[in-house]
Amino acid sequence: MALLFSSLSYTPVPPISNSNSFTFHKDRNHFSLPFSSRLQCSITASNLCTPTPTTTTTVDTSSLILAEAFSEDQLWAASCLRVRSFYDFNPTVYAIHDHKRYLAEREFEALKERVAGKREGFRRVSCINATLPLSEISNFSDDLCTECKFSDNGEERVVVGTLDLNQCLRLPDEITGMKPEGIGSDFARAYLSNVCVAKELHRNGLGYLLVAKSKIVAQDWGITDLYVHVAIDNEPAKKLYMKTGFVYENDEPAWQARFLDRPRRLLLWTGLPGIQL
């Protein structure tokens, strides 16, 4: 759901000099929890981080591009946004920038492996990004522009939202969807993971647009049943997914959440028009 690594590829990160250097968001399933609830742990399936209310900026989305990412430059920018979204860093800690780069490099390598089809158990994985021209946002977030910038045919753009679409039967350490059943279900079932939007741009509808784009790509793949996992107490995330057509299917047993040391998850499902098995 790799270090920022979606649950798809997470491995523990060696500690650096100060244990308070960063905090990992346990619920990478959308809208990260308030700071008091964020703990350090392995990553799970998907996340649309929205922190406690902060100043956000309204942007003109007419120049927004929602598309699958293929270039390493753009995959790197997406990896940097995930690290930026899923961890809280203590800026006073020595060499914290080196550690952030280390996390981004780990996610980048894992993401390339997934997108290239080298991850066992996954038929196909696509990284879908929302990007804006650098000129549109350079006046309000130097940090975002510096870390998540890439070049596309000579134009400098910034990844402001990202997610993974995973064509597979199940995600590691997550509740498994039940639809469709029988032979061929691995072709027609997919999950969203690693969903996040730059914190400065929350409330611009970017999460909704990313999910809508993922449905279009999923339909092109022949997916009939799309799933996403969300923390049971993550109301903003649940509202977003239900607004986009997801409904409740199942929930994680309390013992499993305790064993994995994370908030309990709900499994949400939506059906997609297309070929039925």
Image (spheres, grey):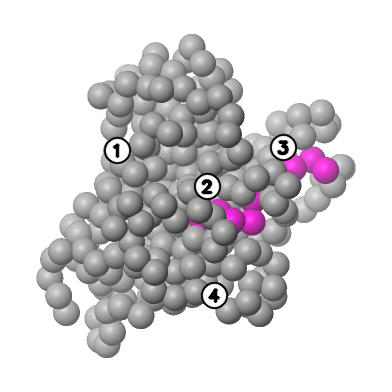
Part of the protein shown in magenta: 20-30
| Figure check: 270 above or below 61 | below
Check residue 89 in the rendering and tell me which mark sits there, or answer none.
3
Q: In this view, does 270 lie to the left or right of 236?
A: left
Q: Nearer the viewer, residue 108 or 6?
A: 6
Separation of marks 4 and 1 at Cα, in angstroms: 32 Å
Check residue 235 in the rendering and tell me which mark sits there, or answer none.
none
Residue drawn at the location 44% of the way across and 56% of the way down? 238
Give the mark nearest the N terminus, 2 or 1.
2
Badge 2: how crowded within 10 Å, few (<14), some, or many (20+)? many
Q: Name the residue under label 4.
A: 252
Q: Name the residue under label 1.
A: 66
Q: Mark 2 points at which residue?
A: 31
- Which quadrant of the figure has residue 10? bottom right
Query: Which structural element holds mark 2?
Result: loop
Query: In this orientation, does residue 117 appear?
Result: no
> Closer to the observer: label 4 or label 3?
4
